[in-house]
Amino acid sequence: MKRVLILGCSGAGKSTLALTLGERWRLPVIHLDKHYWRAGWVEPPREEWRAQVAELTARPEWIMDGNYGGTLPERLAVADMAIVFDFPTWRCLLRAFRRAVVGYGRTRPDLADGCPEHIDFKFLLYILNFRRKNRPSLMQALDSFAGPKLTFTGPAEVARWLSTPAPQLPHGAPPS
């Protein structure tokens, strides 16, 4: 079974790494943002979202990026590996702002149809407060995760890991 979670603050590069690993390891990529948001940036009802996450995590193989702390325990329970981007707030803010400016008005492939890129004050506040409000519970949840964990504190670490001859899949299985 090959199930890899990629977690961390918005703007860190979770979706980009998910695509890179999905291609390299020939695993399907699940962008949680694409499944969560409805057209017009509308949130789904809680029970509908939980059922959708249950369906997504039941799949035999995936690389899944996104936080959504309310469903993290269920996802960690079936994941083989967790990768955490523990980047500084300034870096995530800069990347998210750049992404919004460059893609303004267009919908990214990792988002649901009808959710065009924009600059949203609530989203920027989420990034600003992530280390204080969200990171502690994320790290606490990961403390009880039995599988392998990789924590990266910056893009240079990610690049070094990716440049190794064969970054390993969970439990040392060689990539396809």
Image (cartoon, grey):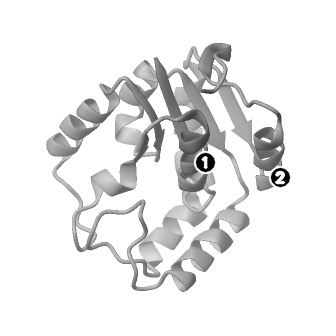
* Residue 154 sits above or below residue 40 on the image: above
Q: Is residue 169 left or right of residue 4?
A: right
Residue that label 2 marks: 156
Mark 2 neighbour density, 10 Å: few (under 14) some (14–19) many (20 or more): few
Quarter holding the C terminus? top right
Instruction: Report how far apart the C-alphas of labels 2 and 1 lie in the structure.
Output: 15 Å
Report if residue 8 is visible in the image. no
62 to 88, vertically: above or below: above
Residue 34 quadrant: bottom left
Q: Residue 102's x, y, as percent?
A: 56, 83
Residue type at mark 1 is Thr
Question: In the image, is residue 24 above or below residue 89?
Answer: above
Q: Position of residue 140 (x, y in %)?
A: 57, 29
Left or right: where does residue 13 sit relative to residue 100? right
Q: Which amino acid does label 2 sit on?
A: Ala
Residue shown at 82%/33% (left/top)?
165
Residue 20: numbered disc = 1
Q: Which of 132 and 153 is in front in this view?
A: 153
Name the side, left or right, on which 84 lies relative to 57: right
The local crowd at label 1, few if under 14, some if 14 to 19, many if 20 or more residues have their Cα within 10 Å, is some
Tell me residue 68's x, y (percent): 40, 45
- Element on which disc 1 rests: helix
**Res 75 → quadrant:** top left
Q: Is residue 131 visible?
A: yes
Figure disc tally? 2
Residue 31 percent location from the top left of the image: 41, 50
Residue farthest to the front?
176
> Does residue 150 sit above or below 64 in this rendering?
above
